[in-house]
Amino acid sequence: MTKTQKQLINYVKAALHGETFLDSADSVTTKEKNSVIEYGKQQGLLPFLQYFPEFFMEDVREQFFHHLVGCVYEDSRQTAEIGEILDAFEKEGIYCIPLKGIVTKRFYPASELRTMGDLDLLYQPEQTERLKAVMESLGYIYEGEAAKHDHYRRNGRVVEMHKELMPVSSRAYQYFKDSWQRAVPESGKKYICQMSPEDHYLYTFYHLLEHFIRGGIGIRMVLDLYILSGQKVLDLDYISRTLEELETGEFYRYLISLAQGWFGEEPRKEHELEMEEYIVNGGIFGSWENDVRNVKVTFQSGKRFLLHTLFPDYRVMKSVFPWLKTPLLLPSAWLLRFWNVWTKRRENIRLQFDRA
């Protein structure tokens, strides 16, 4: 781990524990501060630096404040946009569950500390057409569907409306398919629901695991798990049992131990260093190099990956097109999928060929 990487993790840890001055603050050079700012941007953790006076000194103040204001502004815009969507869904009777950062940021010391990209919500597939009409009435453009979610865009901002939480190939697919049965309405709402604390925690972990296997993960995803693990209402025994049943308990223990070593009071462990390096050397979602390398490992060759991507199996295609009742209709579904991608998400074609 480089000095810059260690410094950023130490700043985040100090901010979480209410410390606003580090022993090394006076000796941090302008070059080091600029490096931490840039790495903080890369990891989606720059707002944590606002608690430390050295970033408001004349040598870096203008640059840092410019980026910080951008994060705060983006957070306020996203909050307003989420509120607008949820109010419309409640009014029109569209059941949904806010996901990922929309919920996780509620547990951070301040909302802007948990940066977000896309906005994610889970909905019930039988309400697809009504949901589409509501989104279009709010000014969103429908950009097509993928295996797990539909894409909507307005003013450059993307909303992912999830029909499923996990790919059908995941061991956890059935567990998360039953999430609606464990969800409850938010206070004062009928149609806006929330996952149980355990389901949100488990989904945060499995979303992390998906990215870890693909391009990797960054520091922020580990931080999410650390912060959520501090909830007193969590049934940790239930979480442990579920992870063991889904055969991911060992990886989870490695990850939460690493999180405690970074942000808690536990010492860092020697056997975690390889995982640590894999995480800190990418961005929020790892790196392109990791993604390409992991594709080769998972599929053994780029050709196999492309065949898998171009011609998903029946289970995957059925999750995209509910009307697909028999494998005999697979060719028709593949053609429709090709057309949707070509007309609405053409840039994704080049991306997949590059990954191969």
Image: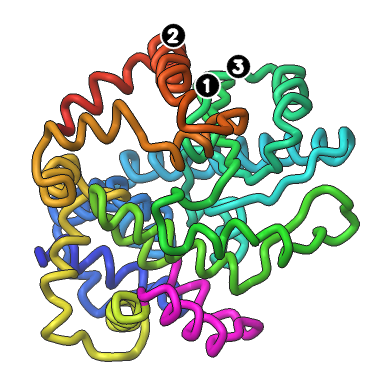
Q: Mark 3 or 1, which is nearer the eye?
A: 1
The question of residue 237 being in magenta is answered with yes
Front one among 282 and 134: 134
Discs 1, 2 touching: Cβ within 8 Å: yes
Q: What residue type is labelled 1?
A: Gly
Please give the label number shown on residue 325: none
Marks 2/3: CA distance?
Answer: 13 Å
Q: Name the residue under label 2.
A: 343
Q: Name the residue under label 3.
A: 141
The question of residue 246 being in magenta is answered with yes
Image position of 132 with respect to 127: above or below? above
Find the magenta span and give its range.
Answer: 224-248
Q: Which amino acid does label 2 sit on?
A: Thr
Q: Residues within 10 Å of mark 1 (few under 14, many from 20)?
A: some
Q: Is mark 1 on a helix, strand or loop?
A: strand
Q: How many labels does the image show?
A: 3
Q: Which residue lies furthest to the top in this view?
A: 343
